[in-house]
Image (tube, rainbow, N blue to C red):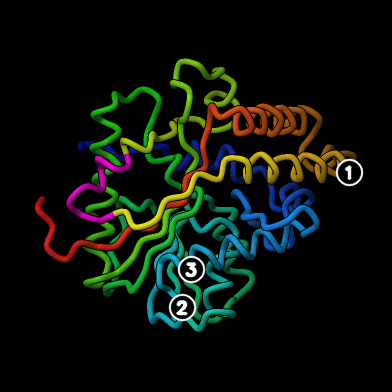
Amino acid sequence: MNEKPGASAQAIQHHYDAGDDFYKLWLDETRTYSCALWENQDESLESAQFRKLDYHIAQARAHDAERVLDVGCGWGSLAQRLVRAHGVQHVTGLTLSASQKAYIERQAWPGVEVRLENWFDHSPTGPYDAIVSIGAFEHFARPSQSEAEKVQGYRDFFRRCHGWLKPGGWLSLQTMSYENSRREDFSDFFNKEIFPESDLPRLSEIAQASDRLFEIVTLRNDREHYARTLQVWRQRMKAHRAAAVAQVGEAVVARYDRYLQLAMIGFHVGTMGLLRIAFRRLDRPWG
C-alpha cells in the first residue's frame, strides 16, 4: 500500500487529546479506555479493568516476558500492569496521541518506553516475546476503503506482528466489530464527530487477514461487557458533568454523552460486537 492504512495521527488526536483531566473524570483510576471484563454485578469498574488487562496478558503468554509490545497503549495501564504485576522487563508502547505519550513519560515507570509512532512505521531493536493490542484495531481501516483494501491493511499489520514476534509467540487482540449491521447502517455522527477516518472490522476480515500467519486459538464476543462499561462511564460523566464542562465545554461533553449512549445501545442490541482474540504465531507460514 502506498499510504499508511487506517486513521491519521491528526484523526486520532481529535479524539484522544481531548484532555487528560477530562478523561480522568469518568474513566477508572487506571485510565483504561476500552471494554472491561466483568465477573459479577457488584464489582467496581477498576476491578473489571484489571481483570481485562490480566486476561490479555495471560492470553499473550506475557507473564515474566523480557520484551512486550503494546500497540495502542493509551495512558499506559497495560504497560504499567505488565511491569508491576507480571514481571515483564521491558514494554514498548505505541500511540499516536501526543497527550498520552506525555502523560506516560511523566509517570517515569521503570521498564516502560512509549513512542509516538504508527505501527506501520515501527522497527523494533529486537524480537518480542508477546504482543497485545487493545482498542486500536478499530483505527486500522478507513470508511472510504473497500473490503479488499481493509483486509490488505489488516494483513499488513499481522505480517508485521509475525515478523516482530519470536517463534511460538502470541498476540492478544481486542477490538470492536461490526456484527448484525453494515457500515451503511451507522450514523455519520460516529465518523465525523467521534472517530474520524476509522472503520470497524468484521470477524471474517480479521480471520482472512491473519490466515496462514497466525492461528486463532481463543475467541470471545463480549458485547454485553461493553454495554455495561459504557453505562458506567456515562454514569460517571453525569456525576462529574459540571467539572467536565469546565474542562472541555458543553459541546464536547454533549458529544461524548451522545456517543456513549448510542454505542451502549449498539452493543446491547448486537449491531456491534466486542472481540477478544488470542493468536499463536505460525512458525512456518504459507504466505
Q: Residue at x 81, y 42 (%)?
A: 237
Q: Which residue is mark 3?
A: 57
Tell me the number on the disc at residue 63. Answer: 2
Tell me the quarter of the picture where residue 192 sits. Answer: top right
Mark closer to the observer (3, 1): 3
In this rendered view, identify the residue nearer to me: 90 or 99.
90
18 versus 114 height, above or below: above
Query: SS class of the residue under badge 1?
Result: helix
Q: Which residue is mark 1?
A: 239
65 versus 59 height, above or below: below
Query: SS class of the residue under badge 2?
Result: loop
Please state the horizontal and vertical placement of residue 269, each as a whole percent of the image.
Answer: 61, 27
Amino acid marked by disc 2: His
In this rendered view, identify the residue nearer to me: 22 or 137.
137
Find the magenta span and give its range: 206-215
Amino acid marked by disc 3: Ile
